[in-house]
Image (spheres, rainbow, N blue to C red):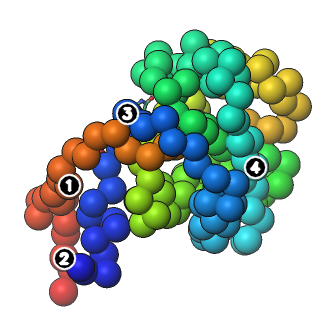
Amino acid sequence: MNNLDFIFQRRSIRKYTGEAVDKKTIEQLLSAAMSAPSACAKDPWRFIVVHNKETLQKISEGLPNGKFLPDAPVGIVICGDIESAHANELSYMLQDCSAAIENLLLAVTALGLGACWLGVHPREDRVKHIKTIFKLPENIIPVGVIAIGYPAETPAPRQRGKAEYITWHD
Ligand SMILES: Cc1cc2nc3c(=O)[nH]c(=O)nc-3n(C[C@H](O)[C@H](O)[C@H](O)COP(=O)(O)O)c2cc1C
């Protein structure tokens, strides 16, 4: 077992067993997410944890590539508070939230769970859909939704690294 296996083995998981994810585990995942780097440590990320099937169904209706969301026992909506972000800048907010999402996905893999990132931002219709469901104030911007559960599929690890993507300046 290599120390980096949990990174190389991470895959998007879109099929889940019916098993519930307990609250302690979800708290661990959120704690991992909030350990991400953040510009000037502004931590603009905000999380909505959704167990309610009807709500997961409603969310999925606005996500064309997230129809499987209600099959997951839990979904986490990651939002950013633009008023908390460094310099109130959208780019910093999105970078911070993306770092948090990746931390969460890697923690999911390390704990033997499976997850898939469902894109929301920058698609305006999807942002509006999520804002409407949760009656979010102007400053809270949905970035993505993560479907999480115990995996009912085991896609093989993929090697997507390509030497031509790298420039070495020695
Ligand atoms: C910003 C972003 C949005 C994504 N949105 C979706 C989505 O809406 N539905 C989905 O099934 N996968 C989505 N994905 C997952 C990608 O399809 C997936 O990461 C990519 O195909 C690579 O596969 P892997 O995660 O198994 O390595 C998204 C990933 C990112 C980073």
Marks 4 and 1, how far apart in space?
30 Å
Q: Would residue 109 appear left or right of 80 to someone viewing this image? A: left
Quarter of the rendering containing residue 141: top right
Residue 19: percent from left, percent from top: 51, 42
Residue 48: percent from left, percent from top: 74, 41
The image's mark for residue 157 is 1
The image's mark for residue 15 is 3
Marks 3 and 1, how far apart in space?
16 Å
If you read the primary sequence from the N terminus, does the residue marked by circle 4 or circle 3 appear first?
Answer: 3
Quarter of the image where the C terminus is located: bottom left
Residue 84: percent from left, percent from top: 83, 55
Nearest to viewer (mark 3 / mark 1): 3
Q: Would residue 128 appear left or right of 12 to someone viewing this image? A: right
Q: Which residue lies furthest to the bottom in this view?
A: 170
Would you say the beta carbon of the disc 2 residue lies within 8 angstroms of ligand 1?
no
Q: Would residue 106 appear left or right of 1 to someone viewing this image? A: right
Q: Mark 2 points at which residue?
A: 168
Would you say the beta carbon of the disc 1 residue lies within 8 angstroms of ligand 1?
no
| Residue at the spot 57% in from the left edge and 43% down from the top edge | 20
Q: Name the residue under label 4.
A: 46
Callout 1: SS: loop
